[in-house]
Each structure stands twice: as structure tokens, then as C-alpha cells.
Image (cartoon, rainbow, N blue to C red):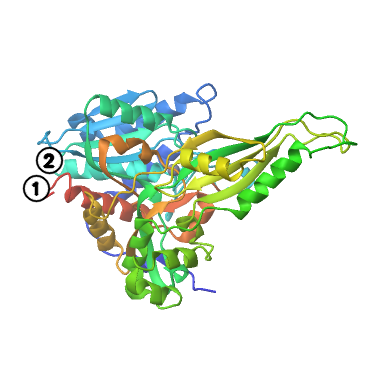
Amino acid sequence: MAEKLDVYRHYSCEDDYADLDMGAACERLAHALACKTVYTTPKDTDFSEFERLQAHLKQSFPRIMAAGTFELVGHSVLITVPGTEPALDAVQLIAHQDVVPVVPGTEDQWEHDAFAGHIDDEWVWGRGALDIKDMLMAELEATEYLLARGEKPRRTIYLAFGEDEEVTSKGATALAAEMARRGMRSAFLVDEGTTTMFDGAAYGAPGAVVSDICLSQKGYLNLRLTARGQGGHSSNPFGGTSLERLCRAVALLAENKPAPTLTPLVAGTFKELAPQISEEPFASLVADVDANAREIADAAAQVRELYPFVCTTVAVDQVIGSSAAANVMPGDVSAVVNFRLLPGVHAMDVQHEVADLLAGLGIEVTIDHSTPAGRMDTVEGAGYAELKEALEHFHPGVTWVPSFVCGGTDSVRYEDVCGSIMRVCPFRPAPEEEARGVHGVNERISRRTYAQGIRVLIRLLERTAFSELF
Ligand SMILES: [Zn+2]
């Protein structure tokens, strides 16, 4: 068993910005967590909770409100703090206002009510403490802190907070469309993304403490395979039933999953980690990552943690329409297959490939729902070096690698208005806090972790939006 990772061993410079009033910042976060901004559907959502949160923001950050504008697009928030050089592309920080509900049946496991805004000497508790009101509030805290120094940003700062990231991302889509309509552009954007440190063992680098800066995200596709059937008595199933054809199709699909592929981003992960990779097969292969891309992808596909990073995954999750009786043949039956698309893979291409594979089986292949994979940005993109520097400054001894997120985030909606999109939370909580709290029970953030994340964002803004050099 690997030793438990003590993230605080990788915290430093905690006395930077000594005049930052962390007690007050934690109180403001607790207040934000007490707003029950659970988004379900437009009809069933209690938007008064969103209005409470928005009123709290307006009241808590007087300098931002005085210097900038606070607008609503639907129930999503767009704050603009104008820069002294409006011709320059802006700096954009985003997050989402909504949180997931408490999982029914787990209410009793919460030490403090998920929406009480409970706070003690060590922790700020509540749904959204890690996903992602911590980031929303920290972005505002960092901006407010710098404005309080009496400086004006050189580049405009946009703060954009969608209303429904956990459900449909319509809020972020509307925000991005509004920005495009007005010709608003950002040099870079920071959004939620991976947030923990982890041991590099999966990459053959045991003992290396790793964290990632995500420059893309996987796409999402629900593909429906349908076999038509007439039903009828099963005493003469001449030619086979619809369910039989569907099963054959599923089996064929399972045997022909997309081959492992090393995207430029995961190649970048291996390149950055190469000096610390000591175990085979990766130790030899990373001597030349590009030449050995195929072998690295194949080897990574054998490791549970790395598998989703090198494969468009295929999960057969639902079968619909089987017969209610054992002696009656089914009518139309279908299976829904959930694909998570590697960056660079398109839903329509997958649909066509699956249709070709299943040709002759009498299966219709249709797209139920899809979200495209993110654009692949690069480590040369605007803001990457500055963000990495800020993270390294406050978290020494961590190797920061480029990667992508396997889930979805709002940021993919902003590709048309942003030069470079980075998905990285500024916080580094303990991995077990992250694993238990996000969408789980007893979600909380330590005061120490929250403070350190605010410092990361202050330093990032100092060296970008507020800098003459960026
Ligand atoms: Zn989130």
C-alpha cells in the first residue's frame, strides 16, 4: 500500500499576501454554500436561491462592483472588470453557481447539514465546498484583493458563472454566445478541472507527486443501436429475434473497441514525467515518446488509471425493450452505448464506424446525445506558463503535467471566444477529501487549502491581467 499522500507537505509561501483576511473570506464562502443552488430543470429549479447567492456576491465584493459591471444572462452571471488597455484580450475566470443535490438516503451521514454553511476552526462545510463554489468565490476574492491595492488591471477581467453546469451547460453556452455577439475575447480562461495531487506510480514513476493542468476534455456520446422486431409467439423464431441481433451487435462492438491512441496531451504528460519514470515498460519507452507513441498507448491501456486517457471508451449501459414473457418474441429492442471520446475524435465519425462495423446485422445506429470533445490547447498557449509558475510557487515538489479531463466542464463552450483554456482548480485538497466530498457526503474544504488556492489566483492575476509584461 502506498503511503497516504500528505498534501500539506507540498504547501509553501503561506505567508504571501499576509494582509489577506482569510477569516472573512471563509465566512463569505460559508454564506455562499448556504445558498441551495441546486439546478434540476428550468421549471423545477428554485431560482430564489440563485438570487440569494447573487445578492451575496454583490454585497461581498464592493470594489469589483464599483469598478466593473454585474450582468445576468438568464440566471448566469457575467462580471466585467475593465482593463486600462481595452484593445488587449482579456483574462477570464469561470466557475458554476449550481451544485448537485445531496444523494437521497445519505442525509444522515452528513456531520453538518449540506446547506447550513457550517464553519469551524479547520473546515468550511457544505455542498459546493469543492465543486465548485470554492473556485467561484476564490476568483472574486483574488480580484477584489488586487483592486483593494488601488491598482487597475491592464487587461479586462471577465468572471463568468453558469447556472447549470451539472445538468446541461445551457448557461455557459448562453454566456459564451453573448460574449461572441459583443466581440469579447479572452487570451486565456481558467475553469474547474482536476484538483488533487497523486502518486506517479501508474506512469511508472512511484514516489513522484504529480498534478495536472488540463488543456482539453473528453467528448460524450450516447449511441443507440436499434433492432426492429415483429414480436409474436416464440415457437417459430425463424431468422432469430430482434434481441438476438442486438446481442450480436453488442458483442461485435465489444470486440472491436477503438484502439488506444496517444494524444499530444498525454504524450506531453509522459514527456514532463520522463526524468522520474523508473519502472518498465514506460522507463524505456519514454526515451523517445513520439517514436514510441503506439507502444506507450498500448501499455497505458493496460493500467486502470491510465486507460481512459488513451482510449475512446465504450460502455454498454442500457438495453431497452426485451419481452415481458419468455414465450413471446420482443418487438423493437435497443441498446444505449456510452462513449467518452478522446480529444480529436468526433461523434459523427464514431457513428459511421459503428454503422460500418454492424452492417448486415440489420441494426440502426443513431445518436441520442453528444457533446464534442474539447479543442486541444498547448503548453505554449497564453497563460499556461504563468499558471504553472503560480502553482509551483505555492506547491513545491509537485510535477505539473499537461493532460485533459475525462468528465465535462463548462469551459468547452467558450472555445470561440478564448485563446487558451485551462481546466485546473487552484486548490489542492487531500485526495480522500476530494474522493468523498465531490458529489458525495461531508463535502468540505480546509481553511488552509482555500487560502492557498486564493493565493494561486492572486499570483496568476498579478502576473497576467495586472502585469505590464503579459
Ligand atoms: Zn463542477
Q: Can you identify the residue that label 1 sits on?
A: 468
Query: In which quadrant is the N terminus drawn?
Result: bottom right
Question: Which amino acid, by three-letter code, is at mark 1?
Answer: Glu
Image position, residue 434 (x, y; %): 48, 54
Q: Which mark is residue 146?
A: none
Residue 174 appears anywhere in the view = yes
Going 63% across and 46% down the picture, which residue do you hit? 316
Tell me the quarter of the picture where residue 366 sits. Answer: top right
In front of the other: 307 or 210: 307
User: Disc 1 versus disc 2: distance between alpha carbons?
Assistant: 7 Å
Q: Residue at x 38, y 56 (%)?
A: 263
Q: Is residue 139 left or right of residue 360?
A: left
Q: Nearer the viewer, residue 234 or 175?
A: 234
Which quadrant of the view contains residue 153? top left
Q: Are marks 1 and 2 in contact (CB under 8 Å)?
A: yes
Using the image, determine if residue 298 lies above or below residue 226.
below
Dot 2 corresponds to which residue?
154
Label 1 vs 2, first from the N-terminus: 2
Q: Is residue 77 above or below residue 345?
A: above
What is the crowding at mark 2: few (fewer than 14 residues within 10 Å), some, or many (at least 20)?
A: many
Pointer 1: residues within 10 angstroms few (<14), some, or many (20+)? Answer: few
Ligand 1 shown in quarter: top left
x and y percentages locating residue 325 in the rendered image = 86, 35
The furthest residue to the top = 43
Mark 1, secondary structure of its residue: loop
Regarding residue 206, the answer to whether it shows in the image is no
Please tell me which residue lies in front, 420 or 6: 420
